[in-house]
Amino acid sequence: MICPNCKKPNSPFNKFCADCGNSLPDPAGVPSPDDPTLYFPSRPTPPPPPQQNYQQQPPPPPPQQQYQPQQPPPPQQQYQPQQPPPPPQQQYQPQQPPPPQYANQPAQGHIPVPPVDTPKKKSKVLRWMMVIIFVPLVLFGGALLAMNFLVIKQANRSYTLGDRHKGEEKKVVELDPQGGRLLVNVADGDKTQLWQITPDSGVEDSYRFVNRETGDAESLEVIDDKVDFNVGINDSAEDDGQLWAISNIEGDNYQITNNWLGDSKALTHYKETYRFLRMRDSGNKEGQLWKKIPAKGGGFYIVNKRYGDGFALDAVYSGEFLDKLKMGKAGKYGNQIWLMKPDGNNFFTLTTKQHDTEKKNRSLDVDPAKKEFVKMAQTGNYSGQKWKMIPVSGEYFRLTSEFLGDGKSLEAVTFFKYYVEMRKASNEDKGQYWVIDRTN
């Protein structure tokens, strides 16, 4: 707008000339600078008018402004409240990237909701999240709506913790309510496999795991037993051992760490392979085909066709599986060297060189209570300890007992046992890759 008095250009919002103070006509159709819909997305920025220079680099105040307290408000004072529109960068604010506090919002993607793809993040930023929840809803739209883990009350949500071992994708973590320990089992929707994962109200970026079978009274905890790797269920309390952090590794895989142990250890699931012995229906299965290999100093190694000569029949001599029978890696071990003592009618008893040397007086026996199982038991005149070799082909034979007859043979069978515990954190350990699936 041109001042009719001094002919100087003015902002269309000025009521008084910025140069001479003359009253300016009120142009029709000019919007108010307070109009929230005002912005100019496509206009080039005009050269800053004098009053803009005055705002950005204020010169020494003009003489009349120095006497403002003593004089009636000059035109400049009436003009002063009517500021020109904000600079373009303020007018374009809805099109600019969100302020810094919103720019960090995607980092919350370590929350286990697959639709949100975010990098691993260990810093804690959730304390103020609920305060600004509705602003990110506008900024991120449907992506944030998928994060219902935080928006919707978690008391109504259940999750499974999935296995990522090759061929075991349908396995999930299960609670043994009686023993308070964790197992890995095939997913079947049982309540012992369902977990409530609730953000802790007192500690930011932390979550409590509660099993649906036992309820809120107990929480998942790292057991304080001086070794700091056992995980189980304990009474819910304000305990760092019951608070967990969930961080994205890649895709829909998450790593779970504990507040008490920090980032050095992560919840890990792994399986061990066991080659135990069972009595099964007789057949030509490789697990039922045995042969003898003479051992130096007397006795025999008894090996199985399924596992080859590198594994030998092993009577467990100590530890968790004491007196059980397994296929162990062949070596110069006394509990793998077998003495076959004749017992008449083509039967013989089986004991190991170690058991014989130490006078343990124990022999291979069929468990009379669980006829499928075999064990080392006190030697005696028992039909379950009388074994017979039935030739099959070449040097291979089957082993049957007088107790069960020729219809059942000794077979090497592979079993897997799963463990869930805290181990050294590593993105390379697939046992630390968890898929957290919502079930309702």
Image (cartoon, grey):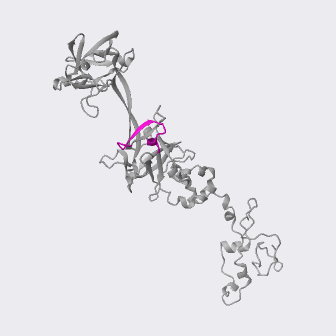
Spot occupied by residue 6 in the image (x, y as percentages of width and height)? 81, 79
Of 378 and 220, which appears nearest the observer? 378
Relative vertical location of residue 134 with respect to residue 288 in this rendering, above or below: below
- Asked which quadrant contains residue 90, the reply is bottom right
Horizontal side of residue 229 vs 17, given as left or right? left
Residue 333 shows in this picture: no
Spot occupied by residue 436 in the image (x, y as percentages of width and height)? 50, 43
Give the total number of marks visible in the rendering.
Answer: 0
Spot occupied by residue 19 in the image (x, y as percentages of width and height)? 75, 79
Q: Is residue 178 magenta?
A: yes
Locate the N terminus by quadrant. Answer: bottom right
Horizontal side of residue 129 vs 24, given as left or right? left
Residue at the front extreme?
369
Residue at the bottom extreme?
70
Of 242 and 51, which appears nearest the observer? 242
Spot occupied by residue 200 in the image (x, y as percentages of width and height)? 46, 56
Locate the C terminus by quadrant. Answer: top right
Relative vertical location of residue 360 with respect to residue 409 in this rendering, above or below: below
Horizontal side of residue 127 vs 271, given as left or right? right
- Asked which quadrant contains residue 95, the reply is bottom right
- Asked which quadrant contains residue 17, the reply is bottom right
Horizontal side of residue 370 vs 86, given as left or right? left
**Residue span colored magenta:** 177-194
Q: Is residue 404 magenta?
A: no
Residue 289 shows in this picture: yes
Relative vertical location of residue 322 with respect to residue 205 in this rendering, above or below: above
